[in-house]
């Protein structure tokens, strides 16, 4: 067992974890952050994307021990009284159907908008290519990112 200290959605946690425990399972099973879904467990789908120290990462490809000392933001941690602008954009643009990819898409979109506050459609599609959606055909997801950019982006 390895002792870790991690801040998740603004709350500090100290735990002992097995060295092989994935961050996604730590978030879901230990902390109850079930808004971060387990998708493929191979880092292909991006559903489990969270922000670690300000950068999006696929939490199924990060060990909990690798997150020691880090600050993690999950989709649940984005809203502080109000929805994050990207969450609002996804709602307004109907950028979800089943919702399974939505947390990862939102987290990756925030990362994209921080790097490029006014991306073109091609840049959005390229920026989100590591996150898979099987329902929407991506069109409304792209519209949502464009909408969020027009509203002030990743704030």
Image (cartoon, rainbow, N blue to C red):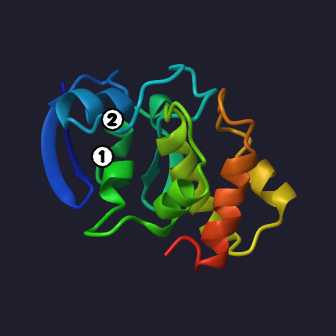
Q: Residue at x 23, y 26 (%)?
A: 29
Left/right of residue 132 with respect to residue 68 in the rendered view: right
Q: Residue at x 74, y 41 (%)?
A: 129
Q: Can I make out residue 42 in this image? A: yes
Q: Residue at x 19, y 37 (%)?
A: 31
Nearest the camera: 134 or 119? 134
Q: Which residue is denoted by mark 2 in the rendering?
A: 64
Where residue 112 appears, as percent x and y from the top left, is 65, 61
* Label 2 crowd (10 A; few <14 / some 14-19 / many >=20): many
Nearest the camera: 58 or 104? 104
Left/right of residue 132 with respect to residue 5 in the rendered view: right
Left/right of residue 85 with respect to residue 30 in the rendered view: right
Mark 1 and mark 2: Cα distance apart in space: 7 Å
Left/right of residue 134 with respect to residue 22 in the rendered view: right
Q: Which residue is denoted by mark 1 in the rendering?
A: 68
Quarter of the view holding residue 73: bottom left
Q: Can I make out residue 74 in this image? A: no
113 is higher (above) or lower (below) than 87: below
Q: Secondary structure at mark 1?
A: loop
Where residue 18 appears, as percent x and y from the top left, is 24, 22
* Label 1 crowd (10 A; few <14 / some 14-19 / many >=20): some
Where residue 95 appears, as percent x and y from the top left, is 60, 48
Nearest the camera: 9 or 62? 9
Q: Quadrant of the N terminus?
A: top left
Q: Residue at x 71, y 58 (%)?
A: 143
Label drawn at residue 130: none
Nearest the camera: 61 or 35? 35
Question: What count of labels does the image hold?
Answer: 2
CB atoms at circles 1 and 2 under 8 Å apart? yes
Q: Secondary structure at mark 2?
A: helix
């Amino acid at each position: 067992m390895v002792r870790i200290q991690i801040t998740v959605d603004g709350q500090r946690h100290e735990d002992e974890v097995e060295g092989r425990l994935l961050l996604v399972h730590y978030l879901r099973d230990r902390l109850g952050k079930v808004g971060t879904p387990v998708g493929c467990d191979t880092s292909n789908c991006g559903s489990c994307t969270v922000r670690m120290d300000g950068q999006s990462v696929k939490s199924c490809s990060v060990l909990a021990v690798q997150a020691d000392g880090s600050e993690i933001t999950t989709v649940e941690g984005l809203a502080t009284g109000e929805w994050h602008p990207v969450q609002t954009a996804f709602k307004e643009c109907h950028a979800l159907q089943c919702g399974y990819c939505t947390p990862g898409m939102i987290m990756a979109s925030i990362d994209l908008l921080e790097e490029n506050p006014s991306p073109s459609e091609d840049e959005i599609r390229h920026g989100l290519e590591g996150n898979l959606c099987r329902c929407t055909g991506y069109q409304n997801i792209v519209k949502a990112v464009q909408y969020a950019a027009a509203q002030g982006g990743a704030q």
